[in-house]
Image (cartoon, rainbow, N blue to C red):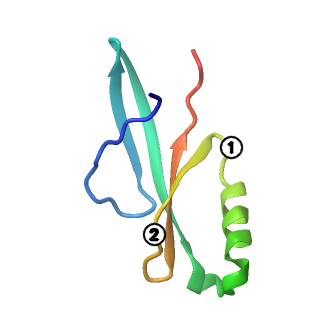
Amino acid sequence: MREVVILIPEIEPEQNVEIEVSINGKKRTINYKVELLNWEKNEVPPKDKVTVLRHFISEKEKDWELVEIGAPDNGNIPLMFRKKQIAV
């Protein structure tokens, strides 16, 4: 199993979450961030939303990976990113 679901308190967009875990006695810190993509601000027609979403994600720093696309709310799409772990 590679993933474990941990419920965290509601966070505001554009904030980072740092979670420290211990696996077989070895501590690791995992970083997450949530960003909002606003459809209404960008005046995106329905047929172009996937293209805009792909472009938004591709412009992110390469050391972050998309892990979840949330449900739309008030014209915003929440996107959760996880900082890539460097293999030791």
Query: Mark 2 packing: few (<14 Cα in 10 Å), some, or many (20+)?
Result: few
Q: Name the residue under label 1.
A: 62
Lateral position of residue 11 relative to residue 3, left or right: left
Please tell me how many numbered marks the rendered image carries: 2
Query: Mark 1 packing: few (<14 Cα in 10 Å), some, or many (20+)?
Result: few
Which of the two marks, 2 or 1, is nearer to us in this view?
2
Say above or below: 47 vs 8: below
Work out which quarter of the rendered image holds the C terminus and state it: top right
Q: Do the residues labelled 2 and 1 touch (CB within 8 Å)?
A: no
Q: Residue 23: x and y, percent?
A: 36, 18
Q: Is residue 5 or residue 14 the one in the foreground? A: 5
Which three-letter amino acid code belongs to the residue tagged 2? Ala
Identified at 35% across, 36% down, the residue is 19
Lateral position of residue 47 relative to residue 24, left or right: right
Identified at 44% across, 35% down, the residue is 3
Q: CA–CA distance between discs 2 and 1?
A: 24 Å
Q: Mark 2 points at which residue?
A: 71
Work out which quarter of the rendered image holds the N terminus and state it: top left
Q: Residue 25: x and y, percent?
A: 32, 12
Q: Residue 83: x and y, percent?
A: 54, 39
Indicate which disc, 2 or 1, sits on the residue closer to the N terminus: 1
Q: Please, what secondary structure does the residue beneath circle 2 have?
A: loop
Res. 63 visible in picture: yes
Identified at 34% across, 27% down, the residue is 21
Identified at 47% across, 64% down, the residue is 70
Say above or below: 2 vs 6: above
Task: Locate residue 41: give its quadrant.
Answer: bottom right
**Farthest-out residue, left:** 9
**Farthest-out residue, front:** 1
Res. 59 visible in picture: no
Which three-letter amino acid code belongs to the residue tagged 1? Lys
